[in-house]
Image: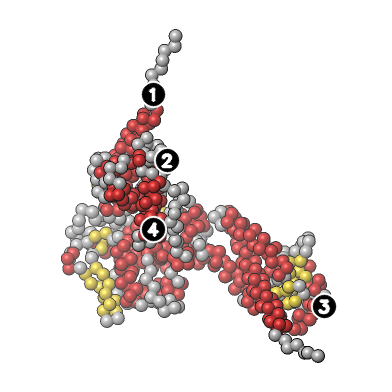
Amino acid sequence: MKKKLPEINILNDNKKNLKKLLKDRLSQLGDFSFTDDSWYCRKRHKDSLTKGCYTLTFYQVPDVYKYWVKYYALLCESSVSGINKKCLSIAKFLNFIHMHYPGLSIDKINKQHVNAFEYELKLSDRSNNNKQFIYSSIQDFFSKLSNFSEMPNTLPTRNINPFRQESKKLDDKMIPENVVRKWDRAFKDESLNIPLEFRTLYWLLRSFPNRITEILSMERNCLRSFYSEYVIRIPSFKQDGGYDRGEPKLIPVIYNGHGKYVIDLIKRLQLQTEQLAIFPSSSQVNKEYLFIVQFWGFFNNHGDIGIRFDPRYKGKVANWEGWKINRLLKQLAQILNIRNDNNELIIPTTHQFRHNAVTDRQYVVGYTTEQIRRLTGHKNEAMTKYYTHQLIKQHKEIHLNISGLRNPKNSPCEYRGKILNLDNRTIQQLSKNPKRYLTWEANGKKGVGICSDISGCNPKGTPVHFECYACDWFVPKLDYYDDYVKEYDYWQEIIERTSQDPKRVAHFENAVRNLSYLERIIAICENGIEQFKEAKLNIEIENNTKLYKWE
């Protein structure tokens, strides 16, 4: 007779093991216990950010649900500040449940309860992005904890977030070129009363695509010299959870021109910091950092830049934080009164300067995408792609400006034998034998447009039809509009495949070139279609308004 095997509750065993494993993670974060309502993650605090940025708080969560939010926090892999934001969002939802459904255990929460909170969220005056974040945090909370038997059997949230995130236009993240050049001139002007530490920080921010936290976390001994070249050592900290520790980012700089100017600023600041390091400060101040500063701010001194020291902190020093830099930029912007072409005062942020720095490296200096990735400290190409969002636009402008092509609104086009926006002599010549001036791709089955150079261009001699597309004599045929669109889609796909591959730079640039000309041709066609429609409508109106002659 076979012995009966003992029953094993795999689910309960796994649940207990998971809870134990999560609690064991606490020692990797800091010196606190699971029951504490404030967790300072000391072991993840590696940069210039304040202690608060590395502290998780659970005071806002109702006691009945508090442990579950703590387990959730331990399951998250993002930055400490990011996890804290999510926990605060979840606390809002759990406080709503506790208030409207007192005594409701977490496993009894269902779609009806979440929908009630969703309705209240819709009526609130929060921004759409804030609503989207709160709801996504609730989704993540129930999803991550779904392996626990105490949680609801089915996810009580919607599969798709009911709130859409409203993203800024990518162009809005850039500081206009004419504005940033004025800022550059101001910070190069040594006669302006800009403190050394702020001038140095500005040029580190402008010259290399670094996060403000990385610059403020630079150590005093950040320079290494090699003959006529220096290497600036900057730590990389990914604030949304990429790096637990600072990974050194080594930036080579030739000691000449602007590079020499930046290196000399750092050297001067090193001496100043050495003198300030002996000043009294709190225990949180890291005196190994390059940026040790006194407490000061800008003010408008009758149109000039004034510096005002805070008397409450006389003789004391601190490390800078990102929000303080943005506040100083705002103060200085109001004094300098730098405006854009629409006469709007532009108040830049540190992150906008990072966008501009990436763009400048890509276009002005000529760094490859791989070099940009290393300079920015991104571990994947996706974020680099996000920052180089102006790349295709810049390439298009370059190609079109070099070619000196006409504006699409004034460019000629042809439809069923009729040609717009050309002089009468050329139109008459082309009309005599349209096939003669049809441009062909080598071995092509049909023409791609018309050549309006009646003086002697040989269309069939062109080996690549894109040479015609790049020519101002080219006249697109509206009948081929769909073909142009298909070509456009094809090259768009090529761009997406090659834009992040450093080995395929030539393919990428060729695709952007072709795309820029096709975009112009499509615009010419669409403008021509509107003109032909308008001409046809005018004829119909004229015919309908003629006076009839009665017999």
- The residue singled out by tag 1 in the image is 8
Residue at horizontal 46 percent and vertical 50 percent from the top = 160
User: Which quarter of the figure has residue 493?
Assistant: bottom right
Measure the C-alpha gap from mark 3 to mark 2: 75 Å
Which is in the foreground here, disc 3 or disc 4? 4
Element type where label 3 sits in the image = helix
Residue 432 image position (x, y, % from top left): 82, 78
Residue 284 image position (x, y, % from top left): 23, 54
Name the residue furthest front.
551
The number of numbered discs placed on residues in the rendered structure image is 4
- Image quadrant holding the C terminus, namely bottom right
Q: Nearer the viewer, residue 90 or 476?
A: 90
Measure the C-alpha gap from mark 3 to mark 1: 92 Å
Give left or right: position of 516 versus 160: right
Numbered badge on residue 154: 2
User: Which quarter of the figure has residue 414?
Assistant: bottom right
Q: Nearer the viewer, residue 470 or 483?
A: 483
Element type where label 1 sits in the image = loop
* Precedes in sequence: disc 3 or disc 1: 1
- The residue singled out by tag 4 in the image is 122
Element type where label 4 sits in the image = helix
* Precedes in sequence: disc 4 or disc 2: 4
* Precedes in sequence: disc 3 or disc 2: 2
Q: Is residue 348 above or below residue 492?
A: below
Q: Amino acid at mark 1?
A: Ile
- The residue singled out by tag 3 in the image is 432
Residue at horizontal 26 percent and vertical 74 percent from the top = 299
Residue at horizontal 39 percent and vertical 30 percent from the top = 11
Which is in the foreground here, disc 3 or disc 1? 1
Q: Amino acid at mark 3?
A: Lys
* Precedes in sequence: disc 1 or disc 2: 1
Element type where label 2 sits in the image = loop
